Amino acid sequence: MTNEQILNKTAKKKKNIFFTPWLAIPLILMVVLVFVAMLYSSGRSYRIKEQQVGMVDDGFVPEYDGLSEKADILVMYDSTRTESSRRYYESVTKVLNTIRLDYQACDVSTDKPRPGKEQLVLFCVQDFDNFSADDFDRFVKWMKTGNIVFFCTPDFTSGFSAIYPYMGINYVDEKEIVIDDIYFNDDILPGLKGETLENTNLLDVTSLCQLKKGCNVSMTETGHNAPLLWDYKTDTSYVTVNNNSLLDSKNVINGLLAHIIVKHVGTHAWPILNSMMVFIDDFPAPQPEGFDERLKEQFGYDTQSFFMNVWWPDMKALAEKHGVKYNGVFIETYNKNRIPPFERGYASVLIKYYAAELLNSDGEISLHGYNHESLIPEGFPNKDGYHGWESEENMEIACETVRDYAKELLPDYTFTSYVPPSNYFSEEGLKALKQACPDIKVISSLYYTDETDTAYQEEFSETEDGIVNVPRITSGFDMGPFDTLLAFSTLYEDGAFSHFIHPDDVLDDDRGAAAGWQAMSEALDKSLTQVKNGYPMLRGMTATSCGGAVQRTQRAKVTTEEKQDGDQKYIAVEIENFYDEQWIALYTEGEIDSVEGGELYQTGDHDYWICCKSSSVKAVLK
């Protein structure tokens, strides 16, 4: 039974919410607001712009899988000793697949750890307890001429003490220290060189090491001058030590990991998205009526008038300044009803005004839900106290309700993306959503989640059922140090900045309202400025456009080869599964002078982005 049938069947039992006496005053205020809105713009008219990067429909191409017995990279891990080693292995191999590098895997608990002479070893083992004496001796001998990255936090009380000289270590203090402020000595994460991330709250510890002369330290814990990441090169070996456990948390420093690896590999390129997205959750949506005392004192407006006359104009100014195209996240009502019939939303004209504003500024509107109840079944564990839906059918009817309501407001607009309320989602919810809203192609949940959380976590990827995952990475008007690290790490690995905010942050002290709207808008401006200063070529996108970029990137296979033609040295780049254009990241120790077949942008001392206009690109070296 559809929602309309249920509503008709129970019509006699319902009260008409539009004529409830106590709603008279807010309705009058609503009429005034709508009239003002119509004076400012054609709130009932909107234009639909073609997607900046269109979706492709040529079959499914699986994500890259670089596991190969012939690879020149060997990932060593221990599946039995620690949970961390397994998580490190998963993080490292995920990044290797993203940046298109093949690898072999060696589980030292079952396999003989015997690196090849020319192999790069990515060491995700915290001790040598599963090494036999012969295996350990062979490993130490290899290290004298080896190429290795220690991605674990070494257990310096174990056999590591025997290889201190090859790791660039003179002495290790047994006392561990808590990581607080992090200083970036070089451009190991382009955009953060010379920056200090203060009060990171990473809940991470490190060992205080005294290093050999000649070590190059990329990251330092400033409170104790503790080296967090360093390189140690000799005439015969190249060693990098990651003296922290940030890889224990999925996706936090994947870009840092990627840069470490390509520095060891040398010249290398991989496909990226070049996408800058800002989502506005719960917008357009019913706004609270009445007054917020702080906003009334500062601006003299009731809450809805503040959003229309101050908040939204300021948000549009930020978008214009930074080249942002907002992705609004539409919700019909905030009731908690999970059993049909589902009442219709009543603030339709004001919502349509904001919807038209979004679309007329080249933005996109994603569906968020009939209400803010996550599409999860009853009993689904979550931190936000959602009780879940008693049936998939009820989820589907609710999705049909918001679909029909949205089409009434914007009859010519096709909704192609979805954001799960509070980022909780389930297989049942996905099935109900796809059944009710078959035009949905893109889902945007979270890129980073706490491992204890059950929120819906995504990578930038396309799945076999035709859904493209375009996750949100950072949040809040003030990103803070942790989100800054996360943002620049993802920019290096995926070429993406994906941020989300909530309009009602300005009403919540815990989310910044205590500082006031001006401070909040200035904080967002500062964060966007920092991102654009590091990556000025970033393309403002919405979720569906980024979905098209994700499809192209997942399909793309990039190969690089250093060549010479007479006196001219160059890097030949070939792209398989090339469409209209493809952005790539390129690392090289050489300095690029010009590019044929693309547009060149430098992001770091040895890092470049190239907008490839053809499947063959030539990067000419100076």
Image (cartoon, rainbow, N blue to C red):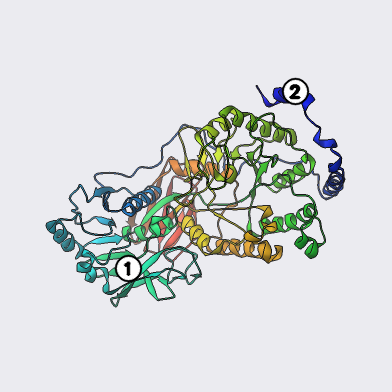
Question: Residue 172 location in percent, x, y?
Answer: 29, 73
Q: Give the residue number, with chain letter if any, for mark 1.
A: 231
Image location of residue 591, percent across then percent down? 41, 64
| Residue at the image position 67 percent from the left and 33 percent from the top | 403
Give the residue at the far bottom of this rendering.
Answer: 213
Contact, mark 1 vs mark 2 (Cβ under 8 Å) = no
Instruction: Check the image and report above or below for 570 versus 207.
Output: above
Q: Secondary structure at mark 1?
A: strand
Give the x, y percent position of residue 121.
26, 56
Residue 560 in view in this figure = no
**Vertical relation: 521 (above or below) 71:** below
Q: Residue at x 79, y 56 (%)?
A: 291
Q: Is residue 327 above or below residue 300?
A: above
Compare residues 545 and 231 and report the one nearer the observer.
231
- Residue type at mark 1 is Asp
* Quadrant position of the C terminus in the picture: bottom left
Query: What's the residue type where badge 2 is placed?
Result: Asn
Taking the image as shown, residue 314 lies to the left or right of residue 434, namely right
Q: CA distance from mark 1 to mark 2?
A: 71 Å
**Residue 281 visible in image:** yes
Q: Could you say whether the residue bearing mark 2 is in a helix, strand or loop?
A: helix
Q: Which residue is mark 2?
A: 8
Q: Nearer the viewer, residue 375 or 142?
A: 375
Q: Quadrant of residue 19?
A: top right
Percent coordinates x, y for residue 139 in the rendering:
18, 59
